[in-house]
Image (cartoon, coloured by chain):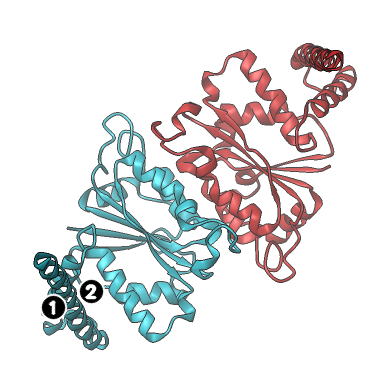
Chain colours: A red, B cyan
């Protein structure tokens, strides 16, 4: 499965959260990182090139800071110019059909503010309706977004957990299940020995993998116990 | 009451619906028409000038084609750059508080598609959540949007009715009531004699005014009848 990550940020080199995510990406031929503002500093989008990119990938992610509950302007321009009729929708416009679409949102306030009564007053599910509608119109499967609340206040442990979530969001088959997480960790463990993951995170990944596999075992054992009790009755 | 109409359209001079709306505007010192792409062809927004404009007006309207369920990119850039912390929100950021905010949306598909089960699958109320959240965060009162579905298929009569709705949306005190509509028509009638309204529409406005006043009378008479019947029992 090939994933296209379209990053939009007015000053992506200065963004701590974007740089953290971008630098964590493994060197993997199935992952294409596409920095929109760096590619098109004058805002003149090469529509044919973008449509070709979309065709080559199975999962398309929009990654951006959630300013005013939407994307930076260049990504909106990209939507308006690249997602044309007869390509993305309308008669014969089925080139995105059955691909997966996801959002990776960097959000400045805590999660609890995004509900009725909270300071923002609306949930992320409500505020992202325009993207849900875009996925629907283009025939893409809308994935549960990866929301990153208040990156700058995260502890090192939280950041490393985010890194795992991010890499799974990019490459894990949907829907994400315990079994698939376990398989992913085993794959990462194998890769780690080949030094393809950033070195500083390797230890953490190995520890997490062991934890997950142990959790998994415990859960399976517990289920077996329940079943055994049931049989006894 | 002073109204600021911020129009955003990548090619506003070529848009039939936008030109129709813009050309219908009366020459009124209480109405400021602000064509974003014409003012900033290079996209470099004068933030101080924009904030001054906002301060001078009581009602702020965003008028744009509803491409991909949101505004054209320049209006998003305007939001990101003009609606700054300490101006529009946050500590001492109360400059927009108690102003009114409204959307004038030009929409390509018929209204019935904007519901669960329709081709678009989401209602306008759902898709405009980001603007509702913006109004909430900045302390503005969110008005019921003026939605213009399929302008190019409208009959002449529908277009003229739209013209009335549009001018009322711009200048009528909220919430719009029968009484306020009547007062508005009487005001327009007076203005018409001064030739401040576009000539070709004057006859229609006068006819509409008479109709509305007659409807009003009928409704009042009916209410009186009900009350009389009630008293008799």
What secondary structure is found at the residue carrying circle 2? loop
* Horizontal side of residue A175 vs A186, given as left or right: left
Location of residue A220 with respect to B14 vertically, above or below? above
Residue underneath mark 2: B26
Residue underneath mark 1: B191
Residue B136's image quarter? top left
- The location of residue B70, given as percent across then percent down, is 50, 55
Q: Earlier in the sequence, mark 2 or mark 1?
A: 2
- Whether residue B43 is visible: no
The answer to whether marks 2 and 1 sit on the same chain is yes
Location of residue A21 with respect to A52 vertically, above or below? above
* Nearer-the-camera pick, B72 or B43: B72
Q: Quadrant of the C terminus of chain B?
A: bottom left
Q: CA distance from mark 2 to mark 1?
A: 10 Å
Location of residue A164 with respect to A90 vertically, above or below? above
Q: Which-is-in-front pick, marks 2 and 1?
A: 1
* Horizontal side of residue A162 vs B51, given as left or right: right
* Horizontal side of residue B119 vs A4, given as left or right: left
């Amino acid at each position: 499965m090939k994933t296209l990550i379209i990053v939009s940020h007015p000053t992506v080199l200065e963004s701590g959260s974007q740089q953290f995510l971008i630098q964590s990406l493994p060197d993997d031929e199935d992952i294409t990182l596409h920095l929109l503002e760096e590619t098109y500093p004058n805002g003149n989008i090469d529509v044919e090139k973008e449509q070709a990119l979309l065709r080559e990938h199975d999962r398309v992610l929009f990654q951006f800071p959630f300013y005013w509950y939407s994307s930076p302007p260049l990504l909106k321009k990209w939507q308006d110019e690249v997602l044309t009729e007869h390509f993305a929708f309308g008669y014969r416009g089925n080139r995105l059909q059955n691909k997966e679409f996801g959002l990776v949102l960097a959000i400045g306030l805590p999660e609890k503010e995004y509900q009725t009564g909270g300071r923002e007053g609306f949930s992320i599910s409500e505020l992202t309706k325009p993207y849900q509608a875009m996925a629907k119109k283009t025939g893409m499967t809308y994935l549960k977004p990866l929301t990153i609340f208040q990156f700058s206040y995260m502890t090192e442990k939280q950041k490393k957990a985010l890194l795992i979530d991010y890499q799974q969001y990019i490459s894990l088959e949907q829907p994400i299940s315990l079994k698939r997480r376990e398989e992913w960790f085993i794959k990462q463990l194998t890769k780690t020995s080949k030094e393809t993951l950033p070195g500083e995170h390797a230890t953490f990944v190995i520890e997490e993998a062991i934890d997950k596999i142990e959790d998994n075992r415990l859960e399976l054992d517990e289920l077996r116990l329940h079943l055994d009790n049931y049989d006894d009755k």
